[in-house]
Image (cartoon, grey):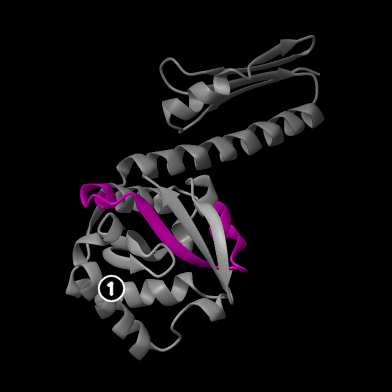
């Protein structure tokens, strides 16, 4: 028994083109996806059983391609901005701060009162080096770079990264790197030749992140590890 199927698909042409390379013609089976005018799937086979198997495989691939398409489209539509923090960013800072540090109890201020004081301290230390990253006007990360800092170990002025964190929902998208690059750019404008930071010894992911950005591991003081990057 021969089975012939012609199925019109309501899918973006970009997705159709990505699947078109999987066209297959051999023996008693033909699978062809046409994309020129409107997406149409043609299937010719010898049994209902093989048709079901072919369609299962096709729609599984189609589902993956559609997810990739919408993720890519979303990224293209996103507007990313890094700007200086203002006092109006306090609530956003606090909400994201507690969210980002969840699970790292040793390394952050646990009460809203002290976190609020911390925000004001960062503003006071160097407001020009305090940055927020926004995607479509939504804050997704902060960094505080203090170019008025005197390092106790270096015995001279350095660019000190007091704080950096990214919304966990947006990690893995290069936002932390963008923030760090912005801080380094600021440090260079201020004439600094060394960036210093302290990271929790047990925070292995953060340590690896800094090493990939060119930071070197130095002294350990209690639960904190000092890292530096020469500019």
Residue 86 seen anywhere in this rendered image of the structure: yes
Residue count near mark 1 (Cα–Cα under 10 Å), binned few <14, some 14–19, many ≥20: some
Locate residue 209, reporting x and y percent.
53, 52
Q: Which residues are magenta?
A: 186-209
Figure label count: 1
* 209 up-or-down from 108: above or below: above
- In percent of width and height, residue 34 lies at 52, 17
Q: Position of residue 83 (x, y in %)?
A: 22, 56
Q: Residue at x 33, y 59 (%)?
A: 158
Residue 129 vs 67, above or below: the answer is below
Quadrant where the image shows the C terminus: top left
The structure residue drawn at horizontal position 18% and vertical position 74%, both measured from the top left corner, is 87
Task: Determine which quarter of the picture holds residue 112.
Answer: bottom left
Q: Which residue is mark 1?
A: 122
- Residue 92 x %, y %: 30, 72
- In this rendering, does residue 80 appear at all? no
Depth order, front residue of 141/34: 141
The verdict on residue 200 being magenta is: yes
Using residue 178 as the reference point, say whether residue 81 is left or right of it.
left
| Secondary structure under the numbered disc 1 in the rendered image | helix
Q: Residue at x 37, y 52 (%)?
A: 194
Front residue of 117/170: it is 117
- Whether the magenta-drawn stretch holds residue 74 is answered as no
Height in image: 45 above or below 175?
above
Q: Nearer the viewer, residue 12 or 101?
A: 101
**Which image quadrant: the N terminus?**
top right
The residue shown at (40%, 73%) is 97
């Amino acid at each position: 028994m021969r089975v012939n199927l012609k199925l019109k698909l309501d899918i973006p042409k970009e997705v159709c083109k990505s699947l078109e390379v999987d066209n297959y013609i051999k023996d008693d089976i033909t699978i062809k996806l046409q994309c020129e005018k409107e997406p149409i799937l043609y299937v010719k086979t010898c049994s209902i059983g093989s048709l079901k198997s072919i369609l299962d495989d096709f729609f599984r691939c189609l589902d993956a391609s559609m997810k990739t398409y919408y993720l890519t489209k979303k990224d293209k539509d996103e507007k990313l901005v890094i700007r200086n923090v203002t006092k109006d960013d306090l609530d956003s800072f606090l909400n994201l701060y507690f969210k980002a540090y969840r699970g790292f109890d040793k390394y952050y201020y646990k009460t809203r009162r002290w976190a609020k004081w911390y925000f004001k301290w960062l503003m006071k230390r160097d407001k020009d080096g305090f940055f927020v990253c926004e995607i479509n006007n939504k804050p997704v990360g902060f960094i505080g770079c203090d170019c008025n800092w005197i390092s106790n170990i270096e015995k001279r002025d350095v660019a000190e990264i007091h704080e950096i964190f990214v919304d966990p929902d947006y990690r893995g998208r290069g936002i932390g790197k963008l923030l760090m690059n912005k801080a380094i750019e600021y440090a260079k404008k201020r004439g600094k030749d060394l960036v210093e930071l302290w990271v929790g010894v047990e925070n292995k992911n953060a340590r690896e992140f800094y090493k990939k950005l060119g930071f070197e591991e130095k002294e350990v003081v209690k639960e904190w590890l000092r890292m530096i990057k020469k500019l």
